[in-house]
Image: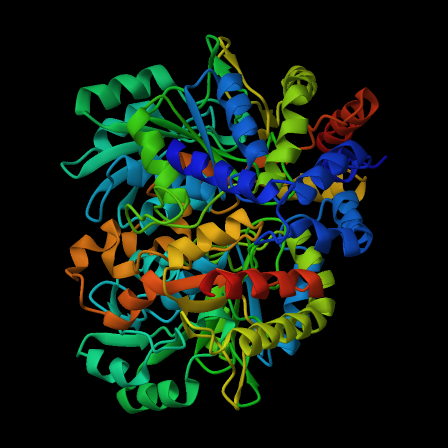
Amino acid sequence: MSKSKEDKMQESKKEAKPEMKVPYTNFKQQYESIGKEILSAITPILANGDFVMGDAVKRFEEKFASYSQCKYVVGVANGTDALFLSMKALGIGNGDEVITPPNSFLATAAAIIATGATPVFADAREDYNIDPELIEKAITKKTKAILPVHLTGRPADMDKIMEIAKKHKLFVIEDAAQAVGAEYKGKKVGSFGDACGFSLHPLKNLNIAGDGGLITTNSDELFKKLTLLHNHGLKNRDECECWGFNSRLDSIHAAIAEVKLKYLDSWTGKIRKIAKTYAKELKGVKGISYVPVDKPYEKAVYHTFIIQCDKRDELQQYLLKKGIGTKIHYPIPIHLQKSAASLGYKEGDFPMTEKQAKRILSLPIYPELTAEQISLVIKEIKGFYK
Amino acid sequence: MEVPYSYLKEQFASPDAILADVKKLVQSGDFTIGKALEEFEKRFASYLGAKYAIGVGTGTDALRFSLMAAGIKPGDEVITAVNTFYSTAAAIATVGAKPVFVDIDDSLLMNPDLIEKAITKKTKAIIPVHLHGLLSEMKNISSIAKKHGLVIIEDSCQSLGATIEGKKAGTFGLTGCFSLHPLKPLNVWGDAGVVVTDSDTVKERILLLRNNGLKNRDECEEYAYNCRMDTLQAVVGNHLIPDLDKVLEAKIANAKFYDKELAKIKQIKVPARDKSARYVFHNYVVMAEKRDALIAHLQKNGVSAKIHYPIPLHLQKASKYLGHKAGDFPVAEAQAKKIISLPVHQYITKEQREFVVKMIKEFYK
């Protein structure tokens, strides 16, 4: 693991270089603008020692429920746990199959594995979301649920997915880790399925200063099970209903998220505007085969803005030299990871995902980007392909 | 006089020094497995005299990951004390193994003489629980484990800093599991946990388990979990470690005073103490006659007392499938009706502890 730490440090060193004109992420600026507000939200928690399952968590859960158009919200330790606990509460486990795309972050498949179930992959479409046509082909007698991922902050094709789920009597657990605030036909992600997992990790659109996650659901029964499962199975301080887990959103993180939730829509607006500018300017550039744009019924929140391009690695190096940070989400599809060896997939099984893995590049996108920075990114990309 | 059970309202009354470092962290954006966490892990390991410390999400996860790293699988049995906190048994059950309970003795801890009777062909591990800042009889337990080829995983969540003949709780087994929950000896601003071990392979496995099985940013070695100690919590922990022993000594002094004074009251039974041990009194627990009336009396007079824990694990609904009944663990059941936890934290003054004793004496008069 020391390797990973080295990698990580090198990455952060790269990003911290003073000559970086457009770093891929910028944590500092956001905290500078609302630091005081966050500090005053945290201070009462420190004074009262209300660190675990405190008032701040309850308050934030209520606000997020109303924001996400859902009846219930349960704060948990991270986005992976949000998916894992949702499936556990739905009774998914050994021998079951759950259909999900192979191009997500690893945690989606890991959450399925952790329940004892098997992830069954269905390839993605050009827009990186799971292809509903391929979901139906992947259904077997063992299939219990579909786990669509609203990847990059773009809602998956929920009408079709819900229709398939209804027809085959499957649960739907949405993975909205990257998609807080995204809408599909005017309805927020997280309000379609039986349950939905969100992440509040520092790199997410609604983020905190550490790990945190949320589950949304409209089901009374599921909510009750989740409140037990994420807190040792405790009905009250002294009575344990079932063996559970310890996966709670820290009060101080809830307080930070509560402050940021107020700004989320305005930040999302800025991000969407940047996405539009990127799309307008980069569409049709020779060497770029795909630029993300909203379909008329979508409101994507662009957690990442991922283009598909020729000579991807060269472009990435070129941009780095010009002081522009970019990333690849993700270079190795889940089914080709060492961890997936026992699932028996091979190269060629998911051609769209595999093709994209070689061509995708994530451009810097966050509300604090200036017009000059955006123009620079566009100019340098165009310059590379000239 | 008010004698609160918790220290939390006083502990972070002046948080400015910690907040200054939190601010630095926020500016660096180094939130996930950051430098402050690495520093904390080193200090934690060195405090215990262990080779490695790995920060994880919670004490429960420290136990779960230890069981996984020890190769515990569905069908295996793991022995533990029947009077522990839920998460010890939950950790065993959620990795698919069966929790096998053992009764306790008048030290409030697992009775080593009963362990061998609980061992079957399926037994793979023993989790001694160092409850309340006490320390299990590790010599006996270690030799039983050795004889039967069992792994020891120490639940040291409540006993950071406890020692026996100078050796610290958490360093006897394959791993030692700690919680940094706000109500623990070293407490951060939310949930966190630590696994300590001297084993390189266990360390490598737990590093994978806590971080999505990632060998590096892009390569996944095994499907795993997201269960990292927040770097922000490590910043808090780094501030608290230097004063840990001072805090523990204050609790020990309060406990010694109680031990001496309460021994004079015939309705109170002080647990058996091993003189070669340093107990750190996360909770100060004694057995009391008319316990519930005593708690009410103390409460009425401003003294906050608690029960850790009123219902032993085998009688919880969660254990129903294990087929236990009342009477299976007579010592734990009898104690559950008598145990009372008195305020013992570092901010208790001489006057306060004297007042607590006075109120108890008054009750039994």
Mark count: 0
Q: Position of residue A32 (x, y in %)?
A: 77, 51
Query: Where is A137 relative to B246, above or below?
Result: below
* Rendered image coloring scheme: rainbow
List the single residue furthest toward the right.
Answer: B1
Q: Position of residue A108 (x, y in %)?
A: 37, 62
In the picture, measured across the screen, residue B69 lies left or right of residue B359, that is left
Query: Where is A213 relative to B39, above or below?
Result: below
Quarter of the image where one finds residue B109: top left
Q: Quadrant of the C terminus of chain B?
A: top right
Q: Residue at x 31, y 49 (%)?
A: B220
In the picture, measured across the screen, residue A318 lies left or right of residue A311, that is right
Which of A180/B289 is in front?
A: A180
Which of A220/B29 is in front?
A: B29
Q: Quadrant of the N terminus of chain B?
A: top right
Q: Residue at x 75, y 50 (%)?
A: A42
Which of A335/A304 is in front?
A: A304
In the picture, measured across the screen, residue B204 lies left or right of residue A206, that is left
Q: Is residue B15 visible?
A: yes
Query: Where is B287 relative to A67, above or below?
Result: above
Q: Residue at x 79, y 22 (%)?
A: B354
Query: Where is A325 relative to B302, above or below?
Result: below
Q: Position of residue A140 (x, y in %)?
A: 18, 78
Which of A324/A137 is in front?
A: A324
Q: Position of residue B226 (x, y in %)?
A: 43, 50
Q: Is residue A229 visible?
A: no
